[in-house]
Amino acid sequence: MNPLAEQLNENLKEDSPYIYDMLSTLGKEMYFPKEGILSQSAEASSQAKKYNATIGIATENGGPMHLKVIQDSLSAFQPKDLYPYAPPAGKPELRSAWREKMIKDNPSLADQQFGNPIVTNALTHGLSIVADLFADEGDAIIYPDKNWENYELTFGIRRGAQIINYPLFTEDMSFNSDGLRDALLEQKDRGKAIVVLNFPNNPTGYTPSVEDGHRIVAAINEAALAGINVVVVTDDAYFGLFFEDSMQESLFGELNNLHPRILPIKIDGATKEEYVWGFRVGFITYGSSSATALTALEQKTLGIIRATISSGAHPSQTFVLNALRSPEFEAQKAEKFQVMKGRANKVKQLLDSGKYGDVWEYYPFNSGYFMCLKLKNVSAEDVRQRLLSQYEVGTIALGEHDLRVAFSCIEEQYLEDLYDLIHQAVLDVQQA
């Protein structure tokens, strides 16, 4: 094992042994090189005043070389903020700005200690980093039965973790905190579990109430008290899009520094929050009261980044930073929020109108981009195929009877026509 990795591990063993025990074999072996191209280039950047022949970019006229045909399209930005490599952890100014935004959006974090956000290539990359650092073959990864299918690829296929699902909803359609608790306590013999919490939930568009949020935290804490090391990932992809009564903050804040056996990790980003899906700018943030643990986790995370993508795209980071600094940012974001809320409210109004009879029920939704129909007596896949072939409408079939509808991408005036067509497709399948 590399001496740098050994030192990070020794620091964790001495300072935060439970976090050390949470690491996968790869996580224990991971480190960020202190000697090599990056470190030597960093040293040269401060001392090589005459010639700096280190980092692998081309320069011209005192700045990064670039093509005019590209710069003409990006003329609002300086070449230095576009063309050079961004640091593996991301632009320092962006990391600071996102941290400030996190505290503003989650006031409970204001007086807490937690890590500085590290820039990822959007949220999937952040989840992949968690999987690499913490998931070994056979480890338990726990998340509800209504989930984003990429979790299986990221934790199950890539890392060989055992996927354990519990029903998202109780019979009265509230969050099933008892199901989460039971799934956690079943890992007593393993001594470790990874939990993914995704609110607003994809595919249902559901965020629990504040009271249910407390129950979730209590269930995780109970597992920690029972001697189980719990890595808790808050996948906050759709954070902020809360349209009705629900939690308004990420559970990351309530979990942070709750118990030494609990390691909360916040995965979020500009991707969906700021409507810049193609920019691929996300963040991973660790929660701990230990500066030693936070340093070790950051170094291991940078090692993963260095070994996979090297660093994130610089232009995207510059664009997001520029937006966060703009005095118009909050007003423009609030405007888009109202558009999204209007669409969600319209869908709920349609579904509650009685217009569509009793061919379906719908799962609770109060946030995010999606809602999910629970079709009665017909196959969701049959309805999906009918919608495509007969009505040129795209939806997502999940399991036997669930049909996900993304109201995020349908303008409000067309929503009634959309659900009329879905209803007709259900009738068609029933009569076939």
Image (spheres, grey):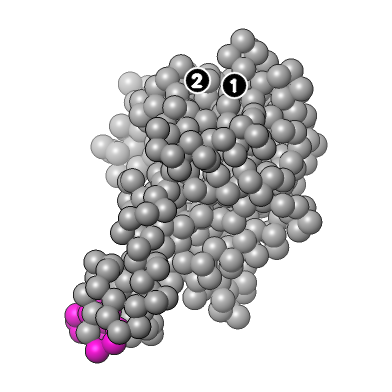
Q: Which residue is mark 1?
A: 192
**Residue 61, x across and y down, in percent:** 24, 89
Q: Viewer-proximal residue, 269 or 30? A: 30
At 60% from the left edge and 36% from the top edge, which residue is drawn?
Answer: 12
At 43% from the left edge and 66% from the top edge, which residue is drawn?
Answer: 317
- Residue type (three-letter) at the residue carrying disc 1: Lys
**On the rendered structure, is 134 left or right of 77?**
right
Q: Which residues are magenta?
A: 61-74
**Residue 373, x across and y down, in percent:** 52, 33
Q: Was residue 73 drawn as part of the magenta stretch in this picture?
A: yes
Q: Secondary structure at mark 2?
A: loop
**On the rendered structure, is 98 left or right of 87?**
right
**On the rendered structure, is 43 left or right of 221?**
left
Whether residue 274 is visible, yes or no, is: yes
Q: Quick one: quadrant of the C terminus?
A: top left
Q: Viewer-proximal residue, 266 or 410? A: 266
At 49% from the left edge and 75% from the top edge, which residue is drawn?
Answer: 322
Q: Secondary structure at mark 1?
A: strand
Name above or below for residue 165 compared with residue 428.
Answer: above
At 32% from the left edge and 32% from the top edge, which residue is drawn?
Answer: 386
**On the rendered structure, is 173 left or right of 416?**
right
**Residue 290, x across and y down, in percent:** 69, 45
Q: Viewer-proximal residue, 303 or 233? A: 303
Whether residue 339 is visible, yes or no, is: no
- Residue type (three-letter) at the residue carrying disc 2: Asp
Number of other residues with Cα within 10 Å of mark 1, as a class: few under 14, some 14 to 19, many 20 or more: many
Answer with mark 1 or mark 2, whichever residue precedes in sequence: 2
Checking the image for residue 248, the label placed there is none
Q: Which residue is mark 2?
A: 139
